[in-house]
Amino acid sequence: MTTPARPAPTIVDVARAAGVSKSLVSLAIRGDAGVSEATRTRILDVASELGYHSNALARGLARGRTQVVGLLVSDLANPYFADVVDGIEADAEATGLGTIIGHGRGSADVLARRLDEILDLGVDGVIVISAMLDADTLDRAAARRPVVMVGRPFAPPRRVSVVRNNDEHGAEAAVSHLLGLGHLRIAHVASSRRAAATARRASFERTMRAADLAPVVLDASDDGVARLLDLVGRPEGPTACFAGNDRIATAVLADALERALEVPGDLSVVGYDNAEVGRLMRPALTTVEQPREAMGREAMRLLRARIDGDREVAEVTLEPRLIVRASTGPAS
């Protein structure tokens, strides 16, 4: 015969066993002032012995707050998103907020469904770390709960604060670095057609034309890396490459090695993101570092302000920086 499961202990059980009032147990568990250290220790020991767990979510719902925020990311396998989440969670933990994460798996449709699911949980607000959702979808979500976006939208939403990287300055710094090394034939391998990638490409083209040089753009989704390396060594072929992100840049380094091309002797390479894998490559990758953790912390700061009643919609742009490593050198 199966023994019936014992009901979970309640705060009343803890108060009875400790010989104190229910309100004193509540104060002790929350860590509020007004409870002596000896009494608090005794109450917590009794709670532990009974297996009592405070239901923070239920308390939050009773107050109209859950003390939990939702995080929505496009691709957890991409180090960029993981670093932004680190910044968010560091701020959230320091301010007593919990987090839950929804993974869009690189699909705008999945992202939209995850956003609705997170909102249905009653979170206090949501940070969307993606530029895949359109402005209308974000604005509809913001009508339910405060929403902050990390990324660069094509069309800025009306109700959503945005934290983004200055992609134009980052791309300009990368190209200027290569020009300063004497490279006159520089190719750009574009990562996508999203807003941030488009801004980097446009800045690459402007910087090249300002130097009276012809910009060469290849598309990573159209065998751009292979086409780039096919041109290296030809009389009018590129001597340097600015990749739209570090994934593309590391692919260029790996494929160049397979073709017995020397980096930076035959081709200098600059990436974008400062992903950990770039530092570990040989040669180590010159790249543009986005302030990813700082972007996460700033997004959390904006979200907390919105949760507390600030109705102002803000756009915050953080500056990237060029990190020079061994994958770039003087033009031969």
Image: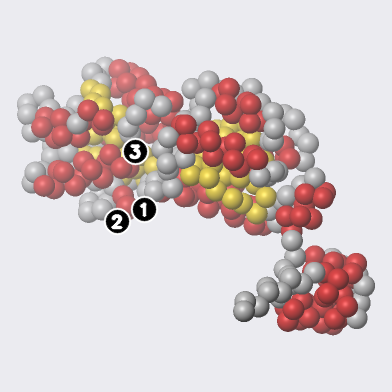
Relative to 291, is 261 on the left or the right? left
Q: Earlier in the sequence, mark 3 or mark 2?
A: 3
Relative to 32, is 293 on the left or the right? left
* Alpha carbon distance from label 3 to label 2: 16 Å
In x, y percent, where is residue 93?
A: 64, 57
Callout 1: 10 Å neighbours few (<14), some, many (20+)? few
Which amino acid does the dot numbered 3 rest on? Answer: Asn
In x, y percent, where is residue 214?
A: 23, 18
Q: How many marks?
A: 3
Pick whichever, 5 or 81, lies toward us.
Answer: 5
Q: Check whether the beta carbons of the residues at disc 1 and disc 2 lie within 8 A of each other.
A: yes
Report which residue position mark 3 lands on: 245
| SS label for mark 1 | helix
Relative to 223, is 320 on the left or the right? right
Callout 3: 10 Å neighbours few (<14), some, many (20+)? many
Does residue 199 sit above or below 150 in this rendering? Answer: above
* Alpha carbon distance from label 1 to label 3: 12 Å
Q: Check whether the beta carbons of the residues at disc 1 and disc 3 lie within 8 A of each other.
A: no
Report which residue position mark 2 lands on: 280
Q: Earlier in the sequence, mark 1 or mark 3?
A: 3
Quarter-of-image position of residue 212: top left
| SS label for mark 3 | loop
